[in-house]
Image: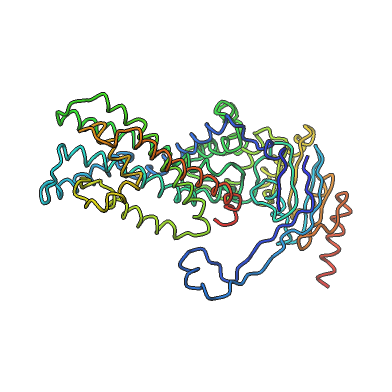
Amino acid sequence: MSSYTETFKQGNSLGRKNYLYLILVMAITDFKVKYDNSALGYLWSLLKPLLMFGTLYLVFSVFVRWDVENYKLYLLLGIILWNFLAEVTLNSMVLLEGKASIMKKIYFPRWIIIIASSLTSLLTLLLNIIVFFFFFIFSGTHFHPSALLLVPYLIELYVLSVGIALLLCALYPKFRDIHHIWEVFVQLGFWATPIIYPISIVPQKYHAFILLNPMARIIQGSRQAIIGPPGVFISFANHFIIIFVAAAFFLVGLKLFNKLSPSFAEDL
Amino acid sequence: MITIEQVNKIFRLPHDRKTTLRQRFVSVFQKNTYERFYALRDINLNVKQGEFLGVIGKNGSGKSTLLKLIARVLEPTSGRISVNANVAPFLELGVGFQGDSTVKDNIFLYGALLGMTRKEIVDKYDSIINFSGLERFVDAKLKNLSSGMQVRLGFSITVSIESPILLVDEVLAVGDIAFQQKCYAMFDKFKQAGKTIVLVSHDLNTVEKFCDRVVLIEKGRIQKQGTGSSVVNAYKLAVDNAQI
């Protein structure tokens, strides 16, 4: 068994308080690289969910019609929240690979890469939420105090997404095709989660499946909190279940990541 | 300062490296064959504070692996390594910069990776740029710089952070004479300041001139260690004999 003494761990040049600055610098650098060569730059990250929303809205309000009040808002919120999960999980693997040359040169805790990459997506998410509230105001829907419940849902979403990202990134250097597999899963999940369709059209016998899906619970809960009508998904029980699943992903992901990350420099 | 006990490092070199699930799936009935390659074998080494240690040996003898283990970039397969101080960046050709970012962004990223705060980086920024001689290229992307410029930048950042241990892997070869002079001056300064330096180099004259102690590594084992001239001469003799 290999072992590093405690002094080694403490001897790491990064103090705990400096992690925060490193995460920030890394996130800013990635942000610049990502949007540097595109004319519309950062606007793309806002346009993407809006264009997706436009397409799906056209299809599902003109060709197919659901019986959902405020379907526009309902759809937009679902897409925004789902896109965050998709972006964090997929981007973190790409960024991990992009950092290979640095990881081969210098030691720093590898989880910092994942957190840094999630920050860019978090910024996009928050801006998207602002765009959503523009739509919200213009649609003439009344603001309800329960909308504040969105905040815990966003926190749960963040922990869940980072947990899955850690899990995927831990395995990625050894099994590169996990990126492709996950892309398919993200597509599958998009249709398996009630994002474009209401939960009511799902046959009763499949409801259990939907309730197993933490994303369905987060999205449904946020909708009931903001758009209404209030329902079972803004209950404490719902939060409890989401937190349980998100924490499980996060802890397992972190454990696996810490176990496998020392050999990243060799595998990548 | 650096203690290495009984360290082995084995690389598994697969005959046919499988990095995807598909490859694993297709070849599930094939035997997974690989070479066990001892990059380092039974290494015991102590480096004291303020010591300037040189590491020499042929290509593929394990010198760089040793540095990477000290830098904690690689994990030893077995054995113990302890370093009770900040390990500074590890320097070698083509320092791992972000090619798509500018020189300035890379300085801040590297500084942060090395544990500097924003203020410390801002304070040192001008001296880093001056030392590297890249004043005109601050906003150029790293990938557009020559390899010599990149190494200069890496070296400049490394020497500016005040870390007590410096690991240097064969960087002097690409710098021009003026830059090499700067480096030598820096080595002298570091020595006087009592810093610990581990230098891997093929430039035997430099090694002999600067190092307090030199370690000769051959096929992953420490073959000989001692004062500069004795080990360097032994190495030269071994190479000469091999040629005859």
Residue A219 is left or right of residue B204, and the answer is left
The image shows residue B140 at horizontal and vertical percentages of 47, 42
Nearest the viewer among B144 and A200 is A200
The image shows residue A87 at horizontal and vertical percentages of 37, 46
Whether residue B126 appears in this view of the structure is: no
The residue at the far left in this view is A62
Residue B93 is left or right of residue B25, and the answer is right
Q: Quadrant of the C terminus of chain A?
A: bottom right
Q: Is residue A128 above or below residue A88?
A: above
Whether residue B83 appears in this view of the structure is: yes
The image shows residue B188 at horizontal and vertical percentages of 77, 37
The image shows residue A135 at horizontal and vertical percentages of 20, 33
Q: Is residue A239 above or below residue A249?
A: above
Residue B109 is left or right of residue A230, and the answer is right
Colour scheme shown: rainbow
Q: Residue at x 17, y 39 (%)?
A: A72
The residue at the far front in this view is A205
Q: Residue at x 15, y 31 (%)?
A: A139
Residue A70 is left or right of residue B37, and the answer is left
Nearest the viewer among B236 and B45 is B45
Nearest the viewer among B12 and B187 is B12
The residue at the far bottom in this view is B30
Count the labels in the image.
0
